[in-house]
Amino acid sequence: MSQTIIKKMGLAGPGVLTAQDVRTRRNVRDLSFLYLAMLTALAMLLIAGAFLWSRLTVVNLGYEISKASTSRSALLEQNKRLKFEFMELKSPERIERIASGELSLVHPKGEQIINIR
């Protein structure tokens, strides 16, 4: 009975390795570890490359958005100026001033108006 208790507890005797995990030496000609390491390194490089590509894309799109926003604000300002100029050019006071000054047009008199029915 004491022998079974000693074996279960791992105390089989001096110099006996019962409860220890003993590993054998790895075969030098076995390249599976090298293949696994290369595959892992390649996967990490691909992941890092994808991350860098996505970050560069985000930064470039940010610059494009900034340029488009600046261009949009400049175009809105130009649109406001053109609307104001259009309203100035189409004002009745300006048209009457040009008609009377440059073209020498006058308002018709009563006898110059002919009513047509």
Image (spheres, rainbow, N blue to C red):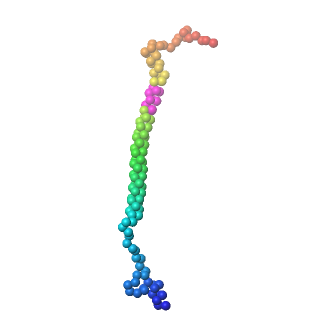
Please give left or right for residue 116 compared with residue 23 in the image: right
Residue at screen point 58% across, 10% down: 114
Farthest-out residue, left: 28
Compared with 74, 57 (above or below) is: below
User: Which range of residues does the magenta coloring cover?
Assistant: 79-88
Please give left or right for residue 116 compared with residue 44 in the image: right
Residue at screen point 56% across, 11% down: 113
Residue 87 magenta: yes
Residue 16 magenta: no
Q: Which quadrant of the view contains residue 81?
A: top left
Q: Which quadrant of the view contains residue 14?
A: bottom left
Q: Position of residue 4 (x, y in %)?
A: 48, 87
In the rendered picture of this protein, how many numbered marks are placed on residues?
Answer: 0
Q: Which quadrant of the view contains residue 85?
A: top left
In the depicted view, which residue is nearer to us: 114 or 63? 63
Residue at screen point 45% across, 32% down: 79
Q: Position of residue 96 (x, y in %)?
A: 47, 18
Q: Position of residue 105 (x, y in %)?
A: 47, 13
Q: Position of residue 46 (x, y in %)?
A: 41, 54
Compared with 82, 37 (above or below) is: below
